[in-house]
Structure formats: structure tokens, C-alpha cells
Amino acid sequence: YGSTIAYTGIDRQTLLAGDDAARIIRGSAFADTLTISDADAATTGRMRVTVSGMSWYDAATGLQQSSFDFLTPTTSLTIEGYGGADTITIASLDASFAGDLLVYGSQLAAGDSSHPSYPADETDLDTVHITGNLDLQGGYLEVFADTITVAAGVRITTTDNDIVFRLRHIATLGEQVAQNISPLVFTDKAVSLSIGANAVLDAGSIYFIAQA
């Protein structure tokens, strides 16, 4: 009774990183389901990230929460699924958002000094869904995942800036070993891009890049 327990060496999970100008949403090392949306359609200035199947305990309030609101960033919003087979849904953006939207199923290769702004390779299968209209007001849109879908009727606007969808599937260690053992061994690797009926992509340039 009355004892104090001190914990050291425990990894701290931080969902919100970056700052109010360049906000970063970062998932965990496991399979996450993240949804990005406008926090309140009636007002501007805030956005929300919701994590399905996971919650955080706030020691200050004594409450558990699975969604977090943050100020609408002024220059960029980056979403990194990090590890695991992640599903990221972009449902909506705050009406005042005017910047770059960067969505990566993995994470930027911060440890690679030669390509620090390029997503790291991983073998887990990541999926990105765009289910609502997005107007970046001149911002740049970049999405890296194994599967990318744009829902029917959705309009994505970057004005004179670009839209880049890159689909890439990296072979697992087992697949690589099997391929090296025999030239007769084939593996089924696939990526998928689906643009729904009547969806509109309005941009200066549009790039679809697939590698499997």
C-alpha cells in the first residue's frame, strides 16, 4: 500500500505528430484502421482522426478515447499507417484546408538519408479509400498503398497541382526465398486501383504508377 511503481523503457505511442502547420498522423506497428474527416461540418478550423478497435487512456481526464481532433494544418497533412496491414479512409477534409495531402500505407523512410521523403518498403498489404469529396485548394495529393479506391461520385480537386497514386506490392521473405530456390516457382503479386463510376479527378497532372 502506498507504493510507487516507476515504468521505464516502455515505447510511447503517439498518434499526432508534427505541428499545426505540417500535421502528421501516425499509426502503430500493428494493423490499424484510420479514418480522417472534418471534425464539424458546421464550423471550420478542426479535423478528426478516428482509430477503429483501439483507444487511448487520458490520465488527465480519466477517459478513454478512440478519436482525436486537431487544428486544420496550414501547409500539409501526412498520414502514415506505419507497420501492419493498414486501412486508411479519407472521408472528408475541413473546408479551410488548403495544402498537401500525403497518404502512406507505410511511413516515410526517415532513416534513409538518400531518400528521406520516400515511403519505406514493407510487405504488409495496405489499403487507402477515398470516400468523400476532397478540395485541396491548390495542394498536392500523393497516395502510396497496395490498394487504392475512389468511391463513386467523388470529386478530388487539386486545381493546378498534381495527383499521384502509386501502387506497390513488395514480396514477403517467403516469396523471395521461393523465387530464389527455383525459376519455376511463381508468386501471385497484385495491386489494385479502383475509380468509381462518375468520380472526377481534377488536377494539373494525374499519375497512376503500379509495381508488383
Image (spheres, rainbow, N blue to C red):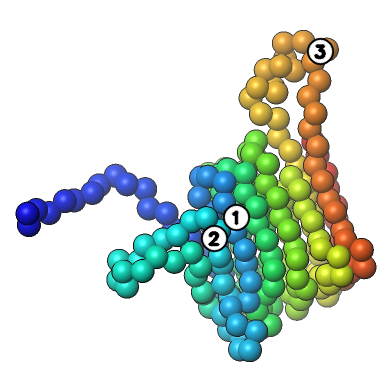
Q: Check contact, mark 2 vs mark 1: CB within 8 A.
A: yes
Q: Amino acid at mark 1?
A: Thr
Badge 2: residue crowd in 10 Å (few <14, some 14–19, many ≥20): some
Element type where label 2 sits in the image? strand
Q: Is residue 204 visible?
A: no
Which residue is tagged 2? 51
Q: Nearer the viewer, residue 179 or 5?
A: 5
> In the picture provided, is 195 more to the left or to the right than 78?
right
Element type where label 3 sits in the image? loop
**Which label is found at residue 192?**
none
Q: Nearer the viewer, mark 2 or mark 3?
A: 2
The spot of residue 88 in percent (x, y) is: 65, 57
The spot of residue 41 in percent (x, y) is: 65, 84
Q: Quadrant of residue 38?
A: bottom right
Quadrant occupied by the N terminus = bottom left
> In the picture provided, is 99 more to the left or to the right than 151?
left
Q: Amino acid at mark 3?
A: Pro
Residue at the spot 70% in from the left edge and 23% down from the top edge: 175
Q: CA distance from mark 1 to mark 3?
A: 37 Å
The disc, 2 or 3, on the residue closer to the chain's N-terminal end is: 2
Q: Nearer the viewer, mark 1 or mark 3?
A: 1
The disc, 2 or 1, on the residue closer to the chain's N-terminal end is: 1
Q: Quadrant of residue 173?
A: top right
Q: Amino acid at mark 2?
A: Val
Residue at the spot 53% in from the left edge and 78% down from the top edge: 71
Which residue is tagged 3? 183
30 over 206 or under it: above or below: above
Q: Check contact, mark 2 vs mark 3: CB within 8 A.
A: no
The disc, 1 or 3, on the residue closer to the chain's N-terminal end is: 1
Q: Is residue 13 visible?
A: yes
Which residue is tagged 1? 33
